[in-house]
Image (tube, rainbow, N blue to C red):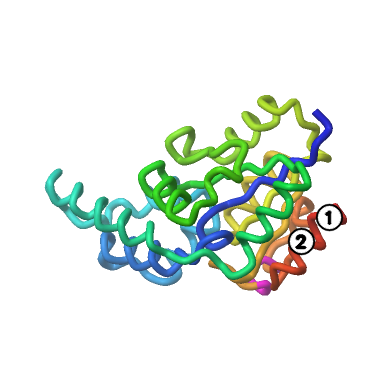
Amino acid sequence: MKKKVIIFDMDGVLVNTSSIAKESIFKSHPGLTEEMHEDILSGNFHEGLEKYSYLRKPETEEEKKIRQKEYSERKSKAPIFNGIRELLEKFHKLDYVIILNTSALDRNCMPILENLKIAHLFDFIATGDLSKSKIEKFKLIEDKYNAEKKDILFITDTLGDVKEADLADISTIAVTWGAHSKSFFEREKHSNLIGVVDTIEELSDFIIKN
């Protein structure tokens, strides 16, 4: 397997859902601060959320189901970022292996991909139901496609993902139209972070060059 493997995060990279997710977290965790939210996004998302579970608002199973359904429905209608569809189609046609590695669960991932009609562009979709660790999913992807690390590129919008990719030794490009700004990514040095881009055009050029 000598094809280039491009792994995308979903929220904040492909679809404009960062504000929806943030609003949902703050609503379900009264007392959560901006600093706490940044802390959640600066590490493994699921572990970070669990760290502040003591702030989670008590709810019955029925209330939980209603909340989850409302969130899934709202998220499923979020827009794709301008130029992303064309980017995915471009590299799909160029025969790159396009994969999704997202912390989102199936119920919060598949509906939006189907609504936007981009699910078919991915060779493999690794959601939070498969594993809550992106590191584990990076390893699974390597094995599944018999891919060398030099042939894998990860695209994300959060420092937490950069850290997980660093531990997995996966080269990463960060985008600035999602959760974190360029200055946020530059707070720490990570050898796997090979670029920070502000536009889809820059991202496309970076993928081709790397």
Asked where in the image residue 22 lies, by quadrant, the reply is bottom left
**Which amino acid, by three-letter code, is at mark 1?**
Ile
Q: Badge 1: few (under 14), some or many (20 or more) residues near its Cα, within 10 Å? A: few
Residue located at (62% from left, 62% from top): 84
User: Looking at this view, is 182 or 188 the one in front?
Assistant: 182
Q: Which mark is residue 204?
A: 2
Q: Which residue is mark 1?
A: 208
Location of the N terminus by quadrant is top right
Asked where in the image residue 188 lies, by quadrant, the reply is bottom right
Instruction: Give coordinates of residue 13: x percent, y percent.
Output: 58, 60
Instruction: Give coordinates of residue 11: x percent, y percent.
Output: 50, 58
Asked where in the image residue 193 lies, by quadrant, the reply is bottom right
User: CB of mark 1 within 8 Å of CB of mark 2?
Assistant: yes
Locate residue 63 relative to residue 142 in the image: left or right. left
SS under mark 1:
helix
Query: Which segment did they paint magenta?
Result: 182-186
SS under mark 2:
helix
Instruction: Give coordinates of residue 184: x percent, y percent.
Output: 63, 70
